[in-house]
Image (spheres, grey):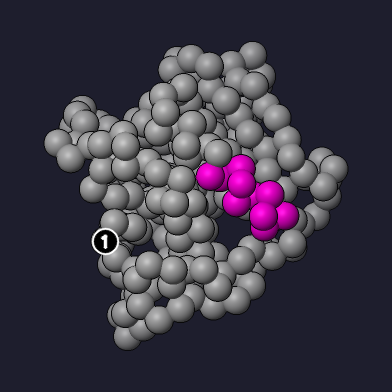
Amino acid sequence: MRPPLRAVAMLAATAALITGCSSGDDWSQPHPRPAAIGSLGPGFIDPSTKPAPEGTVRPQPGSWAGVHPSKDYRVVLLTAGDDRPTKALVTAIEDWADDEHVDLRKIVVGDGHDSVSSIAKAMEMGPDLIVSAGNDLIDPLALVTPNHLDQRFLVVGAELAEPTHNVTAVDWSGASFRGEGLGMSSTYDPDSFTTERCAAAIRAGVAAVLNDLTGIVIWVD
């Protein structure tokens, strides 16, 4: 029998380092539903057809640039691993949050055994969006996300093999790790995690989520 989410979340306090870069709000107060400020540009998707669940869309470069989150968008960044690609993703997400005045909190998972409890802790915080960076989080996310469909997740630089409608991913041919024993993609290239591509990944992914284009993979080659 699985322990309640709240009980599991309490374990995360010793499993993860939580830091914040925020307006000082403790997130306990009522919070307006987040909204997209601005619109997607031509070429992000085919406007006549909504992407199929688990489908892949290939937006035109920069077609997401006009979309910004509303004030005090609440985001938890979950990160695991100290490899160079993960560090590049984390830097890009933190830079985006600073540029967009996002209320960002970060949970650093110190041990793979603590991943599920750290995800639970992130959900308990009540964010608008949980962003994941690091391949070690893919299998734990695949376990947790189907049971919490009201929480939105964004995976950058990897994807879930069978995402539910609350999980959006941003990927490219040099990334594309999917977990579940599938192994690393034959096209995996750590050098593809450039500053520019990582910045595009977080911006394109958030633009999709804010426009209710979820449960899909955004391909940013």
In screen coordinates, is 158 left or right of 72?
left
Q: Residue at x 21, y 31 (%)?
A: 184
Amino acid under label 1?
Gly
Q: Residue at x 60, y 70 (%)?
A: 36
Image quadrant of residue 210?
bottom right
Give percent across and percent down for residue 166. 45, 53
Magenta span includes 94: yes
> Which residue matches tag 1?
55
- For the stretch drawn in magenta, what is the main secondary structure? helix
Q: In the displayed structure, would residue 70 be above or below residue 132?
A: below
Image quadrant of residue 204?
bottom left
Q: Residue at x 68, y 38 (%)?
A: 105
In screen coordinates, is 22 left or right of 142?
right
Q: Report crowding for label 1: few under 14, some 14 to 19, many 20 or more residues within 10 A (C-alpha).
A: few
Which residue occupies the extreme bottom position in the image? Answer: 48
Q: Quadrant of the N terminus?
A: top left
Q: Quadrant of the C terminus?
A: bottom left
Using the image as rendered, state which of residue 5 and residue 80 is in the foreground: 80
Give percent across and percent down for residue 45. 35, 75
Q: Is residue 126 visible?
A: no
Q: In the displayed structure, would residue 95 be above or below residue 139?
A: below
Using the image as rendered, state which of residue 143 and residue 181 is in the foreground: 181
Give the residues drawn in magenta, as a range: 92-101
Q: Residue at x 53, y 37 (%)?
A: 90
Q: In the displayed structure, would residue 105 be above or below residue 196?
A: above
Give percent across and percent down for residue 14. 64, 14
Using the image as rendered, state which of residue 64 and residue 55 is in the foreground: 64
